[in-house]
Image (cartoon, helix red, strand yellow):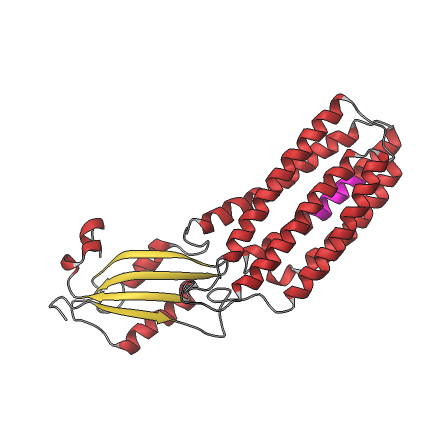
Amino acid sequence: MSGHSHHGLHAHHHGSDHHGHGHIHAPPDFGRAFAIGVVLNLGYVIIETVTGLWHGSMALLADAGHNLSDVAGLLIAWGALALARRAPSPRFTWGLSRSPILAALANALILVAACGGIAFESLHRLADPQPVSGDLVMIVAGIGILINTGTALLFARGRKGDVNIRGAYLHMMADAAVSAGVVAGGLLIRLTGWDMVDPLLGLAIAGLVLRATWGLLTESLALALDAVPAGIEPAAVAHWLGGLEGVSAVHDLHIWPQGTTGAILTAHLVMPAGHPGDAALADIAHALHHRFGIGHATLQVERDADHCRQAIAEGCTG
């Protein structure tokens, strides 16, 4: 060991009390929730598509297209959760825990594409409105309210801790709201006989879905690009580490997501008195987990930051 004493610590904390962070896996019964959601929504998509084509309802076809994208989204999210549970391998040393991030991003992109298709067809129908049965639209959309709300409730418990599960939950709740809007549109058509309501409602649906999707798109894209997970403030972490006994400076601090629910940290701690011992570093790892939700920390201890290339490159601050 050289005079400035580099010590690497791999501090990995597992605990039963995660406070919504760390290594959290979807409960086993979410597999059943996905299966039920896919079957119910696929059946509803078939009903909406057949009814919409038979009676020329753009609102129903728009909602069917959205629901079909949700079926695809549920399948993608379900598959990603299954992949995330696979054990690490020599090639994939973290396992496939980031699969749900890619699934959430794919779901968001699918929804954006669906919104574009709905808007295009609705604009076309505005130029050439077609007669629509308001009663039929209300009945079919009313069924959708029940199916979408029921499916959303299946994912309600996991929506706060996992962006992938939250995406499924938000999609289903948005679908229920959209179906309620379709019912209102059907009522307007019945009362006024104004067929323009149908394509206008299609445009409104596209706008609402795009708005609901935007947050999922930006969050999943940020996670895919290894942004610091939401709820963790790097400056606060650096300040806390820098205030620990024996630490004179912190540098080369990096925090990135591990899947959709965990976080990983690496940092260099300048400790002039030398390595504080394994027990002290284990306590730091434990505190990082419970204070900031960082479940996997790798810390490198240095006596003198001047000898560290990273510190020289980025400037070491205490």
**Which residue lies most toward the left here?**
3
Q: In this view, does 69 lie above or below 207?
A: below
Residue 136: within the magenta? Answer: no
| Magenta-highlighted residues | 175-183
Q: Can residue 34 be seen in this view?
A: yes
Where residue 209 sits in the image (x, y, percent)?
Answer: 64, 41
> In percent of the image, x 37 and y 69: which residue is there?
287
Residue 181: within the magenta? Answer: yes
Q: Is residue 214 left or right of residue 11?
A: right
Majority secondary structure of the magenta segment? Answer: helix
Q: Is residue 296 left or right of residue 300?
A: right
Quick one: 50 or 10, which is closer to the camera?
50
Where residue 250 sits in the image (x, y, percent)?
Answer: 25, 59
Where residue 210 sits in the image (x, y, percent)?
Answer: 61, 39
> In percent of the image, x 43 and y 48: which residue is there?
225
> In percent of the image, x 39 and y 66: which residue is there?
296
